Amino acid sequence: MLGMRKGKVDALLGIVFGDEGKGKIVDYFTPKYDIVARFAGGPNAGHTIMFGGRKFVLRSIPSGILGEAGLNIIGNGCVIAPDLFMAEAKELEDAGYDVRGRLHISKRAHLILPTHRVLDRAYEQAKGKRRVGTTGKGIGPTYSDKASRTGLRMGDALVGFQEKYARLKARHEQILRDLHYTDYDIAEEERQWMKGLEYMLSLDITDTEIEINKALREGKNVLAEGAQGTMLDIDHGTYPYVSSSSTVCGGVCTGLGVAPSSIGEVFGIFKAYSTRVGSGPFPVELTDETGDLIRKTGSEYGAVTGRNRRCGWIDLVALKYAIMVNGVTQLVMMKSDVLDSFETIKACVAYEKDGVRTEDMPFDTEGWHAVYKDIPGWLTDLSRATSEGELPAAFEAYISFLEKELETPITIISVGPDRAQTIVR
């Protein structure tokens, strides 16, 4: 693995559709960093970490909270639901982790109101067959309010909050009436939300962009923890089937308040195959027994929603595009062991539609079909490997093929869910 530079922000980004296992790698990296910071997304992004026989699913809190990072930050680019946040934080506290002393929240991070979640459901219903397949957590409507300059930020909760809250809630209720979506009751949800906000106000609500830049001037290292993946980015993803935030490397700058010159290494994390949750085009999707086997072997079910993930072979068209727009310097390949039982593995090297073939990501991937290259499988239990020297030759050939195609080194390989099942090349 390439060396880190002091006083830089290294980014760990999902570079396809998310759900790659970022939490595990952030946790693995944490001892090397002074600060771990989330820069985008909300409680729809579940980062699962397993070690010592225990499983943690983090939604809003940076994965560095489970490691040795001195400070964890929820940046201004994030959106937060106080009730869900409180439940997550208290679960960590009950497990013995210091949340209060090691977590700072940006005053500029936007708040997800209970009515945002109702709006999420209403908007999805109104779209009918064109629904995006959101998690219903209110993420999109919250970012919409942010863009329309009507949202509430964490700093708003410090002074005169109730009036601001009532004004935004009334606006949402009018929209819901206009949509003829009035059959809902958020009274209990709202009570829990207010309790969650009170809990959050007992934590450190700070100008996190100032803190991070001060730390960088002091030569400290920051790890920016991504959410979702590049193909769900609001600008560069498979629009409109995307998330509502900037999930790419540029989002690190806007979501934490750091300059582009502060970015150091960009780690792009991907699986040895492909998955997608929700609606939208997915050229490599396998709707047969092979797809079912990958899903079952890889436990491909959403960490937050429990939904089945759509599964397929690795997509080099999407990966090349993501590496380009993010400036990826190192690749991290996850769930390599899931493909252990396949005699032949396929890799999508191009898309084809109406007799046209392309290796570049098209504006609209609807209707495109994958063109595959066959690669021999390794038929070996990778989960037992503890070093690069123990990896079978056929697997090393797969790695070499990917590195040649992607023109980027694969420096870390995960061969299982536990911390220890991580190989550095």
Image: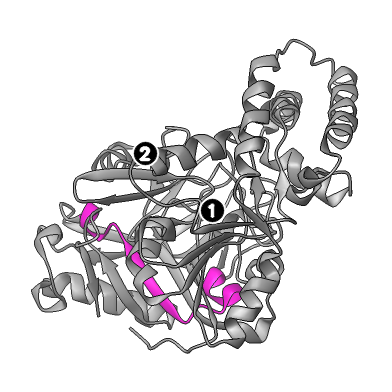
| Residue 273 x %, y % | 35, 56
Q: Amino acid at mark 2?
A: Asp
- Residues rendered magenta in the picture: 321-339
Residue for point 65% across, 78% down: 213
Q: Tell me, yes or no, whether the two marked residues, 1 and 2, touch with CB atoms within 8 Å.
A: no
Label 1 – label 2 distance at C-alpha: 27 Å
Determine if residue 353 is in view: no
Whether residue 319 sits left or right of residue 297 in the image: it is right
In what quadrant of the picture does the C terminus appear? bottom left
Provide the secondary structure element on which disc 1 rests: loop
Confirm whether the magenta stretch covers residue 136.
no
Determine if residue 391 is in view: yes
Residue under label 2, please give it: 94
108 relative to 221, above or below: above
Confirm whether the magenta stretch covers residue 332.
yes
378 relative to 145, above or below: below
Q: Residues within 10 Å of mark 1 (few under 14, many from 20)?
A: many
Provide the secondary structure element on which disc 2 rests: helix
Residue under label 1, please give it: 228
The number of numbered discs placed on residues in the rendered structure image is 2
| Residue 317 x %, y % | 50, 66
Residue at the far top: name it: 183
